[in-house]
Image (spheres, grey):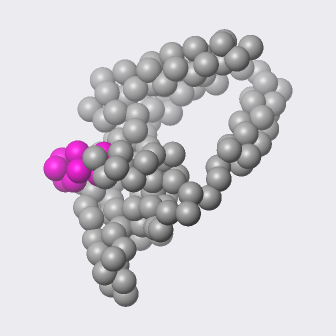
Amino acid sequence: MWRSYFESSVLLQQALDDRLREASGLSLPEYNVLLLLSEAPERRLRMGALARAMVFSSSRLSYQIDVLERRGLVCRERDESDARVIHACLTDAGARKFDAAARAHLTAVRELFLDDLDADEVTALDGVFTRLRTALRVPSGEPD
């Protein structure tokens, strides 16, 4: 079971990444950064909070933000009340790019994953993965 899960999850992520790159020019991690920022209040998150949500190290997120910033899709802003805190912010161009990519991504998720599952399987997998995510997310102790 473990091997089937491991291999299928890697294959699924690769297929989703390939489809997303072809449709939008975004990688799956880039899309996920834009997704999280689009859902955040004022379209901005502290870098530490974004790294935890992405399940990324701070250095990996910093690199990802550098790439997206060069493309004009995100920006960095210092916190007004604490200059030590940096926020990642979704730009208007980033919001447009995310909106354009979202339909292709959702179609790929449906075609590559959900269409092969019945409602009971979706419910069971949602329960299993929600429980695992909760159990495995340990506070990092890193500042936001």
Q: Is residue 57 above or below residue 75?
A: above
Residue at 50% x, 63% y is: 142
| Magenta span main SS | helix
The N terminus sits in image quarter:
top right
Q: In the figure, is residue 136 to the left or right of 87?
A: right
Q: In the figure, is residue 61 to the left or right of 4?
A: left
Q: Tell me residue 132's x, y (percent).
A: 73, 39
Residue at 42% x, 66% y is: 46
Q: Is residue 2 above or below residue 103?
A: above
Viewer can see residue 73: no
Q: Nearer the viewer, residue 63 or 95?
A: 63
Magenta stretch bounds: 64-73
Q: Nearer the viewer, residue 25 or 66?
A: 66
Please, which residue is most extreme toward the bottom here?
81
Residue at 34% x, 62% y is: 88
Residue at 81% x, 30% y is: 124
Q: Tell me residue 32's x, y (percent).
A: 44, 44
Q: Tell me residue 69's x, y (percent).
A: 22, 53
Viewer can see residue 72: yes
- Counting the numbered discs, the total is 0
Q: Tell me residue 64's x, y (percent).
A: 31, 45
Please, which residue is most extreme toward the front here?
141
Question: Does the magenta portion include 29?
Answer: no
